[in-house]
Image (spheres, helix red, strand yellow):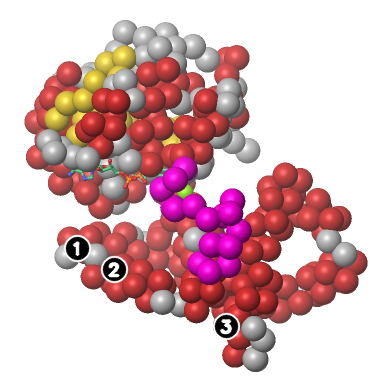
Amino acid sequence: MATIIYDNETTFDALKDKIIAIMGYGSQGHAHARNLHESGLNVVVGLRKGSSSWAKAESDGLKVMTVEDAAKAADVIMILLPDEKQSSVYYSQIEPNLKSGDALVFAHGFNIHYNQIVPPKDVDVFMVAPKGPGHIVRRTYTEGIGVPGLIAVYQDATGKARELAISYAKGIGATRAGVYETTFREETETDLFGEQVDLCGGISSLIKTAFEVLVEAGYQPEMAYFETCHEVKLIVDLIYEGGLERMWHSVSNTAEYGGMTVGPRVINEESREAMYDALERIQNGEFAKEFILEGMVNHPVLKAMENQEKEHPLEIVGKEIRANIPWLNKKIDDD
Ligand code: NAD
Ligand code: MG
């Protein structure tokens, strides 16, 4: 079982005299920078000259510098750039500005675990990974709560790496919900597995396939959308709040009996084998290699698949339905 660290066991002592650079001001970057700043810590944001986020970070009250200058100024450097860009930015702009005893921090183990970044031996390397999207990390912090987080130490040059990780986790609000200790390997492999087979890949394929079956069988796309997509949230909310038990309790006996008997026929032994196959490709580095090469040629496969996804009938009817429901009629970036 994992070790869990809660807020009342933690302090800011390890970080209070340090300068923390947050590289990137995207989903995670803006949340970490603002939360740490409001926790009273010394934060600078590292960005490219001309980045559209530069003015945004400044108007959020933060000091902004180039990545090089921020790396030079900081003792603790959190890299919140897209995973596939981290290695080139690290080698060209961060590593030349590291000093002995600095800390390199990640929110995902990918680049360390798959050998894309090999830091010098005299710096601390650790991870603080909130288990939630950046916008939720920010919103929950302002509400006085937080999302749970993971910490892991990869390299402890100063003897302070774990303490720094815990202070950092406190600064973004994660200790309020509990921080769990893990390793770079475990976080990387489980994170990739979850997003591929369950959270992003699994659920989107389940929704699309169920939608396609109903529409192909002659039902109206609107009915298919409500049934296979819209209601997913209502069911997942129940599971999130009280586990499967709460969900089974809330639905009708018909839904409970049908769900329990038919679910395992749909997600069946073949699906289990596909999950093991996905896990093996994560563990042996094949997935990482594929994704890194895809990034090096500017994501041709990802771009093509994004375009195909936009044209899927589920997306088209979904857009129309949501446009008619005022509180769902928001752009992706409104949040
Ligand atoms: P993002 O794409 O939202 O933001 C990346 C930021 O980097 C942007 O501000 C972008 O302008 C900046 N950037 C891109 N290229 C740059 C360059 N060459 N120089 C300087 N700045 C550059 O990324 P994200 O989703 O916040 O992911 C950051 C890290 O957090 C990743 O390691 C990811 O795995 C991890 N993570 C993300 C989430 C999430 O919910 N998004 C959750 C947990 C962990
Ligand atoms: Mg994840």
Tell me the element at label 2.
helix
Q: Earlier in the sequence, mark 3 or mark 2?
A: 3
Label 2 vs label 1, nearer the camera = 2
Q: Nearer the viewer, residue 326 or 265?
A: 326
Q: Residues within 10 Å of mark 3 (few under 14, many from 20)?
A: many
Q: Which mark is residue 290?
A: none
Q: Nearer the viewer, residue 157 or 18?
A: 18
For the magenta stretch, what is the residue range?
A: 319-335
Mark 2 within 8 Å of ligand 1, using the beta carbon: no
Membership of 69 in magenta stretch: no
Q: Nearer the viewer, residue 311 or 160?
A: 311
The answer to whether any part of residue 335 appears in the image is yes
Residue named by callout 2: 303
Which amino acid type is marked by label 2? Lys
Q: Are marks 3 and 2 in contact (CB under 8 Å)?
A: no
Mark 1 within 8 Å of ligand 1, using the beta carbon: no
Residue 46 vertical placement versus 110 (above, below): above
Give the left or right position of residue 293, taking residue 78 as reference: left
Residue named by callout 1: 298
In terms of secondary structure, what is the magenta stretch mainly?
helix
Q: Position of residue 323 (x, y in %)?
A: 53, 62
Q: Quadrant of residue 104?
A: top left
Q: Earlier in the sequence, mark 3 or mark 1?
A: 3
Which amino acid type is marked by label 3? Glu
Q: Residue at x 50, y 79 (%)?
A: 313
Residue 74 vertical placement versus 134 (above, below): above
The answer to whether any part of residue 104 appears in the image is no
Q: Are marks 2 and 1 in contact (CB under 8 Å)?
A: yes
